[in-house]
């Protein structure tokens, strides 16, 4: 590994709009260099999914995404047989069992799709901690050897090893076996300087003062006792709303600013936790 290669990757991601710190850039560089999956952990809304999207754009690859949820099983994540088509084949030409269980009748789900590509895709396994613990066992063979065993066909090995990004929000502990197979990076809420850089790249064109106010308010709200702390996407939505309303200073029209909090606060409890007097206090500190 040559010196500074992760810096080059950091700069390349920055040119396409993703602001990565040195630690994340190094983790991504090592994942690419070593061919290892990368587990990104951190609170919701900090841009973990966007890492995979930005890396896909940088590599000029195809993004294959598996969104995890409770009850996810192999038939939805790896493969299943097209039973309706098999039944039609039996009725039409009395197809043999061997013919019925062939690629012609195989429905590829994201994991199988990812390892059967000619060019290496980016495989995003999003919110792995939302899936059941049993599902992690399905992943181990793939993450260890990049192959899938289908009883009726045999073992299918990756023709081109995918770049694998897993994300987790910390809703449950992940198994040691899964963690051992991955490199690891923790993504926290951005610092003030980083969030200003994200706003400059991804948000509307704003005056520097308003940009500082927006970031200051959002970062202050994250320190409040909220159920759903505003993430980067909410910050960008809020900045777009303020720009669309022609608001150039948060201290000018407090009523309008209060009304735009629908972009930041996503539960009734959080809305009640940030009444006008609380927002006046926060805006007064950043204005």
Image (cartoon, helix red, strand yellow):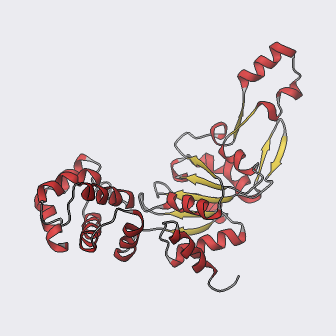
User: Residue 272: x percent and y percent?
Assistant: 18, 51
Most extreme residue toward the top is 91
Residue 270 visible here: no
Q: Is residue 96 left or right of residue 184?
A: right
Quadrant in which the C terminus is drawn: bottom left
Considering only vertical position in the picture, is 155 above or below 35? above
Of residues 242 and 118, which is closer to you in this image?
242
**Where does residue 23 sit, x and y in percent of width and height?**
53, 76
Camera-side residue: 132 or 188?
Answer: 188
User: What residue sits 47% from the left and 70% below the top?
Assistant: 19
The residue that appears at 33% across and 60% down in the rendered structure is 235
Left or right: where does residue 120 sit relative to residue 169?
Answer: right
The answer to whether residue 56 is left or right of residue 99 is left
Q: Where is residue 232 shown, x and y percent of the image?
A: 38, 61
Quadrant of residue 59 in the image?
bottom right
Residue at image location 37% in from the left, 60% down from the top? 231
Residue 3 seen by the camera: yes
Which image quadrant is residue 122 in?
Answer: bottom right
């Amino acid at each position: 590994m040559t010196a500074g290669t992760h810096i080059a990757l950091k700069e390349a991601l920055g040119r396409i709009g993703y602001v990565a710190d040195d630690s994340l850039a190094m983790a991504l560089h090592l994942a690419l260099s070593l061919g290892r999956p990368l587990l990104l952990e951190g609170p919701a809304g900090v841009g973990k999914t966007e890492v995979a999207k930005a890396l896909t754009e940088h590599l000029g690859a195809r993004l294959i995404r598996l969104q995890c949820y409770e009850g996810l099983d192999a038939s939805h994540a790896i493969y299943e047989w097209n039973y309706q088509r098999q039944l039609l084949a039996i009725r039409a030409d009395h197809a043999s069992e061997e013919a019925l269980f062939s690629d012609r009748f195989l429905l590829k789900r994201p994991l199988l799709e990812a390892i059967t590509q000619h060019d290496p895709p980016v495989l995003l396994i999003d919110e792995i901690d939302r899936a059941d613990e049993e599902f992690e066992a399905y992943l181990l063979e793939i993450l260890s050897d990049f192959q899938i065993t289908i009883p009726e066909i045999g073992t299918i090995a990756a023709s081109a090893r995918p770049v694998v990004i897993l994300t987790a929000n910390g809703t449950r502990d992940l198994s040691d076996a899964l963690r051992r197979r991955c490199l690891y990076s923790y993504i926290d809420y951005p610092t003030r300087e980083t969030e200003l850089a994200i706003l400059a790249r991804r948000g509307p064109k704003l005056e520097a003062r308003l940009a500082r106010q927006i970031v200051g308010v959002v970062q202050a709200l994250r320190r409040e006792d909220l159920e759903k702390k505003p993430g980067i996407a909410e910050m960008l939505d809020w900045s777009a709303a303020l720009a669309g309303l022609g608001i150039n200073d948060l201290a000018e029209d407090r009523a309008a600013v209060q009304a735009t909090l629908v972009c930041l606060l996503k539960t009734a409890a959080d809305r009640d936790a940030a009444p006008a007097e609380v927002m006046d206090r926060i805006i007064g500190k950043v204005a």
